[in-house]
Image (cartoon, rainbow, N blue to C red):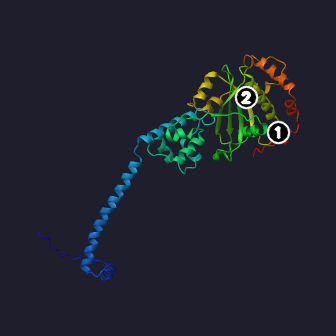
Amino acid sequence: MKKKDIQFNLRIPEDLKLKIDEVAKINQRSINSETMSRLYDSFVMDNNVHLEAAKVIENFLQSRTPTQRKKDVAERLQFLFSEIKKSKFFSELTIAELAYKIGEDSADSAESWFRAEMEPTFNQLEKISNFLSANSNWLLFGKEKPFKIESFRFDEYLDKDLKRLLTSNPEKDFLKDQSVTEVKFIRSMNTEGSLFIAKLYSNRYLECFHTPYHISDVNGVGGYNSLLYLCLLFKTLEKYNSSSNHPNIYSFLLSAESSKLIESSMVHPLPLIDRLHFIPWMDDLADKLPNRLLDDHYWDGFDSLRSRLIQDFNEKKYIQNILNDSEFHIKHPIDFD
């Protein structure tokens, strides 16, 4: 059926009529044609607005829909968050505080990460792993283990080893403005007397290392010589105590069970370490001053090991020269700022 035009009277303001006249001339159309064209366009535009709005809503809902990747990341975030809160330093940490610490403008996006509604960027995940002292490769991709216990072997060159212990790791850019506040020497109560070293920074970041050293008599000749050097290192650390911003040096004993947990890299080492009580085995090892037996205070075999180390310390002239050098810290300066 042929469509027929219907005529109807329309009252419009004078200024609107003038605008239609002007545009009709530019488009070389009659006033009637120009008016009809604009009426049709208004309906098309109205439909497009609705379509665009629907697309925005659809994209928003899709971005908030959990995917397997979002679920995996959220699960890993929840695990790390629960682990770090076992530490006395982070027991009251909230997601909002975490967001603030990594430079987010609000907590809303961070909370959506934990609900698997949104996925953090790789950069955001890197910042989270750094703040929580976690393994970024595990948080980003689920590879390796949640925590990285790195290997640490001394070069047996005092200047280099002292700097490595007492200053920040130059290979980690996010630590460049941080200082080392504590260095912890942790002797495992396993048969070998395995040694762990922990460095705690001013931002509470933790570097945890396992070493090849055994604080016991199970060493062969090479291992014993390394232990002798290690004791010399312990003694030279004391020479920096008067320096400004010098890190605090502590020694601890750790149960064999807790040692295995740290080695597994599946639990956060900080909660295990920060509940330990100071045990001065490091100060007393190779120290001729304590005139008492210390096996009962430390471990079976401590006294015999100490006697052997003291004898070797007395016989080696280069060790005595270092220990008795009142200007050692001047000859071997370290900037702790």
Picture residue at 81% right of the left edge, 43% below the top: 333
Task: Identify the residue at image location x=88%, y=29%.
Answer: 317
Toward the viewer: 68 or 160? 160
Circle 1: element type: loop
In the visual, does 220 lie left or right of 17? right
Indicate whether 12 appears above or below 275.
below
The amino acid at mark 2 is Ser
Query: Where residue 272 sits in the image (x, y, percent)?
Result: 62, 29
Amino acid at circle 1: Ser
Left or right side of 132 for 1 = left
Mark 2 closeness class: few <14, some 14–19, many ≥20 residues within 10 Å: some
Which residue corresponds to mark 1?
Answer: 242
Residue that numbered label 2 is attached to: 251
Is the Cβ of the residue at disc 1 closer than 8 Å to that at disc 2? Answer: no
| Residue 334 placement: quadrant | top right
Using the numbered discs, state the Cα–Cα distance from disc 1 to disc 2 in whole angstroms: 19 Å
User: Which residue is painted at 30% across and 62% down in the image?
Assistant: 47
Looking at the image, is 337 positioned above or below residue 8?
Answer: above
Residue 252, horizontal then vertical, whole percent: 71, 27
Front-most of residues 195 and 87? 195
Farthest residue to the left: give it. Answer: 1
